[in-house]
Image: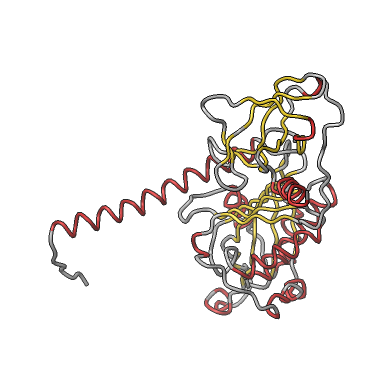
Amino acid sequence: MKENEFGTLENLANQVQNDLKRVGRHVYNIQHQYRAIRKLRESLGDKEAIVYMDFSENYSCKCRSEIQRMHFGASQRQISLRTGMIYYRYTSQSFTTLSDNMYHGPAAIWAHSKPILRGIAEINNIERIHFVSDGPTPQYRSKNNFFLLSKIIFEFGFKSATWNFWEAGHGKGAPDGIDSLVLHDKQDITKAAELLEGLTKLGTKIDLYEIEQTEIDLFNFYKDAKITTVPETIKIHQEIYFNFAINTVLLKVNEVDESLIGRYCVVEYDRLPYPGIILDVDEVDLEVKVMHRIGVNNFFWPLLEYRLWYEKSKVVALLSGEPEHVTKRHCQIDQVVWKAITDEMDNE
């Protein structure tokens, strides 16, 4: 039923301005995420993998020879599907997990993830996982899922992980294309095991896994933990996890020679670490073009080059490459390496 609302033009203009700000932020987030994920995939390292996943529409079981009421209401059985893609540096692989259990909460998320992560850990020398999913708060973007991620990911031997949540209304992705193939299976199906068998017989190249109820129950241990709610969870778009128990050995400068020219490093200046690139060397010192810092582990190249000669003892560590871009201009040092650098400087 329509209702008439009355007000001034000034109030209407203010309301439109406020709505435009929210819409503008929403559109910017979507565009930025597409650029960031595309760049991540294009620059993926040998020891990194992206797992892009989503719970798809439930599969409605089919049984053409059953009585009429089998096809309607509560009598119609469904199968839970989670589809996705794994991206490595040079290859990719699609997957689908199937279960007779309709639960899509944190325990189910990790039960469905377990065979995927086990396969990644066994077959490839992967150290870092980037999860990409949408962000419903009862499922992926919840304190319970954050807790399970912080515990489970390192049990598979991974050193770090990120979980990236799409903005609402982000559009379709690779998992949606996979579930369209699975949902259009025309065989008589009454349970997950039969669907898996039927898809396997069709010769699909999608990796298929069945998830039992007992596997989901194994991940319900989070219910015994007293987990504090994360403030403003709905606004979180990325979670980053590192295993700081791993002993990271920093690469040091043993001898000053021309082989160091062009290498990225971290130097100490006024008791603070700064990344930079080595431009020249002499017998004992190194000329380094350094970045400027803004906040903690956030650096950028200044418009005017900043070059200084440093003693060998002032080079805290050599880096494996240029610091990673977090925006078009700003960079950060790998968080594990950054922790090792700051720990060493604090202990001096």
Residue 324's place in the image compared with 97, above or below, is above
Residue at position x 57%, y 31% in the image: 301
Where's residue 143, x and y in %? 60, 69
* Quarter occupied by residue 226: bottom right
Residue at position x 70%, y 60% in the image: 97
Where's residue 64, x and y in %? 61, 68
Tell me if 200 is positioned left or right of 229 in this view: right
Where's residue 112, x and y in %? 71, 63
Q: Nearer the viewer, residue 53 or 227?
A: 227
Residue at position x 36%, y 54% in the image: 22
Where's residue 63, x and y in %? 63, 69
Q: Nearer the viewer, residue 104 or 311?
A: 311
Total marks in image: 0
Residue 38's place in the image compared with 229, above or below, is above
Name the colouring of the figure. secondary structure
Tell me if 266 is positioned left or right of 33 in this view: right
* Quarter occupied by residue 224: bottom right
Q: Which of 324 and 53 is in front in this view?
A: 324
Residue 96's place in the image compared with 33, above or below, is below
In the picture, the quarter occupied by the N terminus is bottom left
Tell me if 266 is positioned left or right of 39 in this view: right
